[in-house]
Amino acid sequence: MDAWQQSIAQSLSDPATLAARFGLDPAAVSKVAARYPLRLTPHLLTLIERPDDPLGRQFLPDPRELANDGLPDDPLAENRLAPLPAIVHRYPSRVLLLAGNNCAAYCRFCTRKRRVGCAVFNLPFSELLKGVDYIAGHAEINEVIISGGDPLLLSDDALAEVLERLRRIPHLGVLRIATRTLTVLPERITPALATLLGRHAPLYLTTHFNHPRELTAAAGEACRRLAEAGIPLANQTVLLRGVNDDIDTLVTLCDRLLRLRVRPYYLHQLDPVRGTGHFRVSIERGLQLVGALRERVSGLAVPHYILDLPGGRGKVALTPERIVSLGPAMVIRLADGGTAEVPNDEGESQAVPRGLST
Ligand SMILES: *Cc1c(COP(=O)(O)O)cnc(C)c1O
Ligand code: SF4
């Protein structure tokens, strides 16, 4: 077993142990964990000091996940866009290949909360290979985003097999791997993995960092190793209430990512997924934050502020010009001249409007 596999084996997933460690109500933790999976890696446990710190909020179960927030389980209609269990095909030229259904640790705000870590959605390797065959049979696809669950929970051998099969498909250009391991399991980025990924260029790796405290020495070392193996790095951040919805946090995060040779790519408006309403930030505040960020950091460090439209209509980059009308249901203008109505509230307990801390 590799060191990272040992770390997973040593992860904390027992509700009672977790509740005792962080002073939480064991019954409440058990109830949440019975519905949505729970796992914290040893590395993550060294980073969480209190339940309400930026890491605690992202990874410790919260009773509000079970509040009836009236939100759908699958707002992006990924189930409908899945011709096979391992494929989400929304855009003609690029496709998501789901490499598995497990993550090293479970983010409480996850868009795929309905399925990740749940045994009934288990995705065997044979399904992954069927997904590769689907891609081979669709010449209009030129880019594959390997996602999940976390694709880097595959062993190096399994990953090598998938990448080699994908590289044999003549119509594919760029490969992309989306992973959260640099935050929760940085020991996964071994020299052998960096070499393996480097052999399949052009291969981009997207990291998922939400707060500067995730940029530990170990995460920085993992970024260096990947960059030196010739792998371009881009980061996705989810805008989360109480975690990173203030300008100083975003400035520090984006500036430090750029120094680590990671280009801030997307800042995601949280998808309106059941059980995540308490993390919601309004679009007005998101636009203010991105506007303020642009004045404080290099243009290279400014991510696109992205909204994934409900119903599987795809992503739009949010800019002030897109806004047709404000309010709890905001209307935005789409590139095709149409409009879409999107939720714009601040979650179940309305936040006191906060000014920008610049
Ligand atoms: C986000 C997403 C992509 C990739 O979109 P980019 O804008 O190219 O990063 C592809 N397919 C699906 C289903 C997605 O949700
Ligand atoms: S790592 Fe990604 S897929 Fe897994 S729980 Fe976190 S956000 Fe969801």
Image (tube, rainbow, N blue to C red):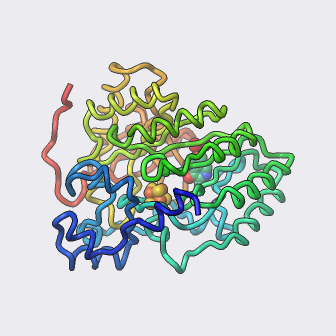
Q: Is residue 266 above or below residue 2?
A: above
Q: Quadrant of the N terminus?
A: bottom right
> Up-down: is 287 above or below 144?
above
Rendered image quadrant of residue 165 = bottom right
Question: Residue 134: where, in percent of width, then height?
Answer: 78, 62
Q: Quadrant of residue 173?
A: top right
Q: Nearer the viewer, residue 206 or 346?
A: 206
Query: Residue placed at 52% from the left, 57% from the top?
Result: 4
Q: Is residue 356 above or below residue 142?
A: above
Where on the picture, by quarter, is residue 279?
bottom left
Residue 325 point in image, percent of width and height:
33, 41
Residue 222, position as x, y percentages in the image: 52, 40
Q: Horizontal placement of 122 versus 30: left or right? A: right
**Is residue 292 left or right of 133 when viewed as pictured?**
left
Residue with the most extreme left position: 352
Q: Quadrant of the C terminus?
A: top left
Q: Residue at x 38, y 39 (%)?
A: 216
Query: Could you tell whether 182 is left or right of 164 in the image?
Result: left
Residue in the foreground of this view, choosing between 95 and 310:
95
Viewer-closest of 12 and 173: 12
* Count of marks overlaid on the render: 0
Towards the viewer: 53 or 312: 53
Q: Is residue 310 visible?
A: no
Percent coordinates x, y for residue 290 in the rendering: 35, 31
Residue at (55%, 38%) from the top-left corner? 335
Q: Residue at x 48, y 46 (%)?
A: 182
Q: Is residue 176 visible?
A: yes
